[in-house]
């Protein structure tokens, strides 16, 4: 079986929707309960079998790389003070997992950021996780979760997989929206993982133009071919090189599937939903301490 072991996490955004919090702290390091938001995203990737994680950042994001590195000075200070347990808890990344960071250079959009990973990903098929979206880690079993389902589905038929979830009318304009080949049965597909073919995507449409309410959640499993399409994708919506456009090109040649999402997701890239997410994560963790 073809296993996906590489993942790309783009962290190059300025996080303007999170100002002033994100002015001097990368938004990916803002807390959700007692961990930085990106901690959960990396844990999710590892639980799904990912071994090599490539962060795509820029000069102001190097603190994220440090978070996943061992701080030798802090480690020895803690151990010197007999705080071995605390020191161990900071070194939680499994030994067979690597997290590296490369810089995007020019900020030309999400598609451009993913393409920047090509020299490291090479010929591998790979996953992409957008760190603005954090999947609920408190319910269900992470190791048997959405990304793992998508990786298995990809292994079966080689179709790239894109995680989608139904969003409220007022949120449609914030997301890539799926155009379906077949009728989507809300009752059948709600809160279970199901994979089916998609006709295309529209990036951030007005509600009136939206082909469905199924939004791209920020988890993708791509065949390596996506790089060829990204290399030929021109800037479009917002003047940016959109990942969605490259996916549309991939669909026409190879076919792409959507996977419906199980569980809940939280948008940590928008102030209002970030605050709601923080409250939920903190409540869960406080309850687990009792
Ligand atoms: C990106 C994608 C969009 C997706 C969204 C999920 O947009 O372009 O298709 O629905 O992430 O969070 P962004 O939020 O980076 O503008």
Image: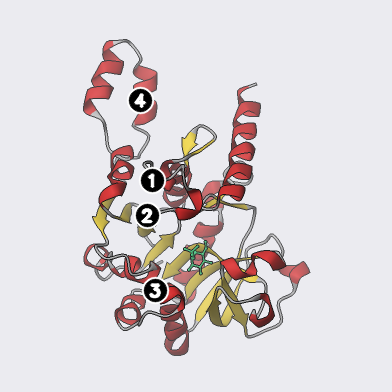
Q: Which mark is residue 11?
A: 2
Which residue carries the number 1 mark? 26
Q: Assign the N terminus to one quadrant of the image.
A: bottom left
Q: Are marks 2 and 1 in contact (CB under 8 Å)?
A: yes
Compute the Cα span from label 4 to label 3. Answer: 42 Å
Return the residue found at the far right. Answer: 187
Q: Report the mark closest to the observer, 2 or 1.
A: 1
Measuring from the top left, give residue 90's x and y in whole percent: 36, 29
Residue farthest bottom in this picture: 252
Do tag 2 and tag 3 residues touch (Cβ < 8 Å)? no
Q: Is residue 116 left or right of residue 187?
A: left
Q: Which residue is mark 3?
A: 240
Q: Earlier in the sequence, mark 2 or mark 3?
A: 2
Q: Closer to the camera, 51 or 271?
A: 271
Q: Name the residue rendered at 69%, 65% in the picture.
A: 170
- Label 4: few (<14), some (14–19) or many (≥20) C-alpha neighbours in 10 Å: few
Q: Is mark 1 within 8 Å of ligand 1?
A: no
Q: Residue at x 41, y 62 (%)?
A: 128
Q: Which residue is mark 4?
A: 88
Q: Nearer the viewer, residue 21 or 63?
A: 21
- Asked which secondary structure carries label 3, the reply is loop
């Amino acid at each position: 079986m073809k296993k996906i072991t590489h993942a790309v996490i783009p962290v190059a955004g300025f996080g303007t929707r999170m100002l002033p919090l994100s002015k001097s702290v990368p938004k990916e390091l803002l807390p959700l309960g007692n961990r930085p938001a990106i901690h959960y995203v990396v844990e999710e990737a590892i639980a799904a079998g990912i071994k090599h994680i490539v962060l795509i950042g820029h000069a102001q994001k190097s603190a994220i790389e440090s978070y996943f590195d061992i701080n030798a000075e802090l480690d020895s200070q803690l151990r010197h003070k007999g705080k071995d347990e605390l020191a161990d808890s900071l070194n939680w990344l499994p030994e067979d997992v690597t997290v590296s960071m490369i810089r995007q250079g020019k900020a030309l959009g999400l598609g451009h950021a993913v393409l920047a990973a090509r020299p490291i990903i090479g010929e591998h098929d790979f996953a992409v996780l957008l760190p603005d979206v954090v999947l609920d880690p408190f319910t269900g079993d992470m190791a048997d979760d959405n990304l793992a389902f998508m990786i298995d589905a990809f292994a079966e038929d080689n179709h790239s997989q894109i995680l989608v979830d139904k969003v409220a009318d007022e949120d449609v304009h914030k997301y890539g929206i799926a155009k379906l080949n077949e009728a989507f049965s809300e009752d059948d597909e709600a809160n279970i993982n199901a994979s089916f073919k998609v006709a295309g995507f529209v990036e951030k449409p007005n509600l009136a133009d939206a082909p469905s309410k199924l939004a791209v959640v920020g988890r993708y499993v791509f065949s390596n071919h996506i790089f060829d399409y990204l290399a030929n994708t021109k800037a479009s919506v917002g003047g940016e090189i959109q990942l969605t456009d490259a996916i549309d090109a991939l669909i026409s040649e190879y076919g792409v599937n959507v996977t419906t999402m199980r569980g809940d997701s939280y948008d940590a890239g928008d102030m209002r939903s970030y605050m709601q997410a923080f409250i939920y994560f903190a409540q869960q963790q406080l309850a687990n301490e009792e």
